[in-house]
């Protein structure tokens, strides 16, 4: 099996190869790249193309590795004991499987997405080393060991907010999603808006590339921002050859809001070349 | 297999473990690399390199591995502006045929060096010289099935038989001046957690204990969440020679203000004297006596100076040395007082480290800081944080 571009998602050769290698060798694949270059989308598309389940584990700053395995709901057990419920005698009633557990016991080899792993505490990846390596873990409360029926395909994304520990990196394959070149951008636009006018795409890309090159932007617009902007443009398309004049209209300044997300970035627009 | 590549990677500063090498072998065994150099390049990079900051070094090592040449770096010798014009050219079948004549790699490299010596200026188009958009086998944005591609920003057809593309990942290299995100990553290492604030987290152990004491009647206990409790005091040098580093310093500032709840910043000019300013628009403001910093902030505060330390040595060493006012005591005295109170102190210098030795004032400050001056780069900050 080889993962390739679908009718809604374009992958580069390098990424395709990285995914194939991770799937074949059963290693987690770590994806980095500018926000909005389709890291999360990749996992969704991969699950779709393999016709399997996607387990999405979004990481927050308070997420603990244990939560991915299971959680023991002590409070409801204590409450049940007050109410004299029979459930209370079996501790297994209060063990809630986390995403990793679900992935290990899924019927078909699932895709497990550990999204934005860098949001969590620095120790988080280290706490998952053993589980990702052995694909098994122990449940202390019940004494059982959960072992993966088949090793799930693990996709991990990171926005580079924290350096990940070496031991963790050694166990992963790594791919850095570069910002796509113009040709790839065209393909991406093509799959999202099949009926768009080529003239508009050319003009929009021209302006988009220039905006990305503006000096000192806090956040450069990326693929997802480009697509949002085009969607807005398509609601009320400008005449061919007039995108710039059309965008420079006072009332449409807000359209730049689809591309630039920081107030401080707007004054930089005055450096755009004319024509 | 690939031991040579492993050794080269090590020489270029990319640490690769045996496990990763075995993974690469397993992947090649499964036929993932196919039979193309391009696939092998991507596969090896995916498996062996785990940081985009090292891609540049990987590229160099990979190139060296392919050619089994020593560390020749031809692209360094070509002025960047020869290759900077993004003129894209598509060629017909016929042209390709003509170009295939340069077959052997040695021949190509030999010619490349030769042309480099002959050529004295920037060039664009055409079929012989090194430049952009042409059909010569050497240069950028052109097309040649067996050519050498140089200093070209985006990844193109990969048909050039080697990528001498030094610039592609060069800006992600770890010693390059950093972006805000990089600063943040570096600063996070300073975090130290402590529990404070409202009690919102269930304290299971205490709850069980309390419930036991109540004879089994549920008694929930709560505790505050953990927060970052690091205290940081940053003194920025502003104005004069610091103007050229304003961008870097701004990035550090915004990264630090996102990262630390307990962050205090003050400003000075060139060297600290008896007063510092609470705002960067400093002349309009009321100054704060430097002695107050010592009184107001405990010695658990980590003190970071940010400045280029580039000034006349007298500005540090003599009373009245300040270029702006008459100071009774020399800057060195004030600096000593601060570092004496705040035992955890470092100086971050935006000047490139290799230039430091040409400035006597930097050496003096370095001495006063007891060698705790570091460059304002990712590596520099990491080293500095180890001292804090």
Image (spheres, coloured by chain):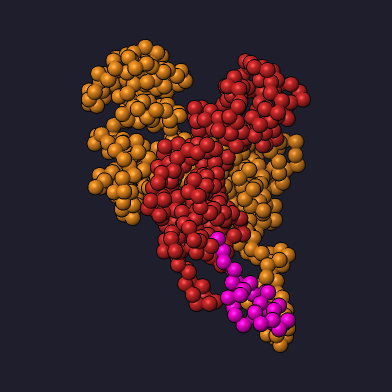
Chain colours: A red, B orange
Q: Observer-nearest residue: A167 or B159?
A: B159
* Residue B193 lies in quadrant: bottom right
Is residue B211 at all visible to an observer of this figure? no
Main secondary structure of the magenta stretch? helix
Indicate the position of residue B240 as horizontal and vertical percent values.
Answer: 60, 31
Q: Position of residue B257 (x, y in %)?
A: 65, 47
**Vertically, is B251 above or below B301?**
above
* Residue pictured at 52% horizontal, 47% vertical: A48
The residue positioned 36% from the left and 25% from the top of the image is B149
Residue at the limit of the structure toward the top, as seen here: B126
Chain part drawn in magenta: A71-99
Compared to residue B328, the image places residue A93 above or below, namely below
**Residue B57 place in picture, x, y as percent:** 37, 39
Residue pushed farthest bottom? B215
Left or right, residue A109 beside residue A89: left
Number of numbered callouts drawn: 0
The one of A31 and B298 positioned closer to us in this rendering: A31
Whole-percent x, y for residue A117 in the image: 54, 53
Left or right of A27, for residue A224 = right
**Residue at 49 percent of width and 61 percent of height:** A107
Residue A188 showing in the rendered view: yes
Q: Horizontally, is A41 left or right of B222 in the view?
A: left
- Residue A90 magenta: yes
The residue lying toward the viewer, choosing from B373 and B254, is: B254
Task: Tell me the residue at 25%/18% (across/down).
Answer: B101
Q: Is residue B142 magenta?
A: no
């Amino acid at each position: 099996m080889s993962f390739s571009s679908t009718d809604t998602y374009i992958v580069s050769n390098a990424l395709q190869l990285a995914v194939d290698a991770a799937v074949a060798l059963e290693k987690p694949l770590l994806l980095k790249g500018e926000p909005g270059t389709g890291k999360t989308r990749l996992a969704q598309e991969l699950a779709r193309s393999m016709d399997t389940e996607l387990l999405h584990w979004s990481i927050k700053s308070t997420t603990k590795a244990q939560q991915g395995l299971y959680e023991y709901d002590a409070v409801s057990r204590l409450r049940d004991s007050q109410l004299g419920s029979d459930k209370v005698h079996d501790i297994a009633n209060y063990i809630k499987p986390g995403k990793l557990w679900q992935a290990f016991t899924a019927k078909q080899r699932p895709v497990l997405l550990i999204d934005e792993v860098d949001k969590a505490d620095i120790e988080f990846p280290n706490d998952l080393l053993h589980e990702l390596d052995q694909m098994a873990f122990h449940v202390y409360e019940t004494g059982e060991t959960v072992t993966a029926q088949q090793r799930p395909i693990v996709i991990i994304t990171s926005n580079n907010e924290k350096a990940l520990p070496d031991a963790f990196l050694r166990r992963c394959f790594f791919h850095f999603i570069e910002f796509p070149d113009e040709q790839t951008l065209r393909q991406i636009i093509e799959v999202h808006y099949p009926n768009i006018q080529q003239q508009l795409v050319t003009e929009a890309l021209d302006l988009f590339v220039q905006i990305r090159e503006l000096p000192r932007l806090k956040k450069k617009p990326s693929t997802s921002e480009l697509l949002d902007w085009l969607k807005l443009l398509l609601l009320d398309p400008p005449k061919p050859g007039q995108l710039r004049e059309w965008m420079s209209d006072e009332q449409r300044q807000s359209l730049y809001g689809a591309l630039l997300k920081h107030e401080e970035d707007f004054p930089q627009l005055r450096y755009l070349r004319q024509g | 297999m690939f031991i040579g590549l492993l050794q080269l990677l090590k020489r270029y500063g990319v640490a690769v473990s045996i496990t990763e090498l075995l993974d690469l072998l397993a992947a090649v065994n499964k036929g993932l690399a196919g039979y193309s150099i391009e696939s092998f390049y991507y596969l090896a990079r995916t498996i062996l390199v785990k940081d985009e900051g090292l891609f540049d070094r990987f590229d160099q090592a990979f190139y060296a591995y392919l050619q089994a040449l020593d560390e020749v770096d031809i692209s360094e010798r070509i002025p960047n502006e020869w290759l900077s014009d993004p003129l894209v050219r598509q060629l017909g079948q016929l042209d390709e045929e003509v170009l295939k004549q340069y077959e052997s790699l040695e021949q190509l490299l030999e010619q490349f060096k030769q042309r480099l010596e002959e050529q004295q200026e920037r060039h664009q188009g055409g079929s012989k010289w090194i430049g952009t958009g042409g059909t010569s086998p050497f240069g950028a944005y052109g097309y040649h099935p067996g050519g050498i591609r140089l200093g070209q920003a985006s990844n193109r057809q990969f048909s050039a038989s080697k990528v001498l593309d030094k610039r592609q990942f060069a800006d992600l290299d770890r010693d390059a001046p950093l972006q805000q995100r990089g600063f943040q990553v570096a600063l996070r290492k300073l975090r130290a957690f402590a529990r404070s604030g409202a009690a919102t987290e269930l304290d299971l152990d205490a709850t069980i204990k309390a419930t036991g004491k109540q004879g089994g009647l549920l008694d929930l206990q709560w505790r505050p969440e953990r927060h970052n409790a690091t205290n940081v005091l940053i003194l920025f040098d502003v104005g004069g020679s610091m103007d050229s580093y304003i961008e870097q310093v701004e990035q550090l500032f915004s990264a630090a203000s996102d990262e630390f709840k307990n962050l205090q910043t003050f400003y000075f000019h060139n060297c600290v004297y008896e007063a510092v300013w609470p705002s960067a628009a400093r002349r309009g403001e009321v100054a704060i006596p430097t002695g107050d910093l010592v009184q107001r902030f405990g010695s658990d505060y980590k003190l970071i100076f940010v400045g280029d330390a580039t000034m006349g040595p007298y500005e540090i060493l003599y009373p009245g040395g300040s270029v702006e006012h008459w100071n009774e005591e020399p800057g060195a005295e004030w600096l000593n007082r601060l570092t004496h109170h705040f035992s955890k102190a470092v100086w971050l210098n935006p000047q490139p480290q290799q230039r430091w030795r040409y400035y006597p004032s930097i050496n003096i400050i370095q001495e006063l800081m007891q060698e705790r001056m570091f460059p304002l780069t990712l590596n520099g900050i990491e080293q500095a944080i180890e001292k804090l």
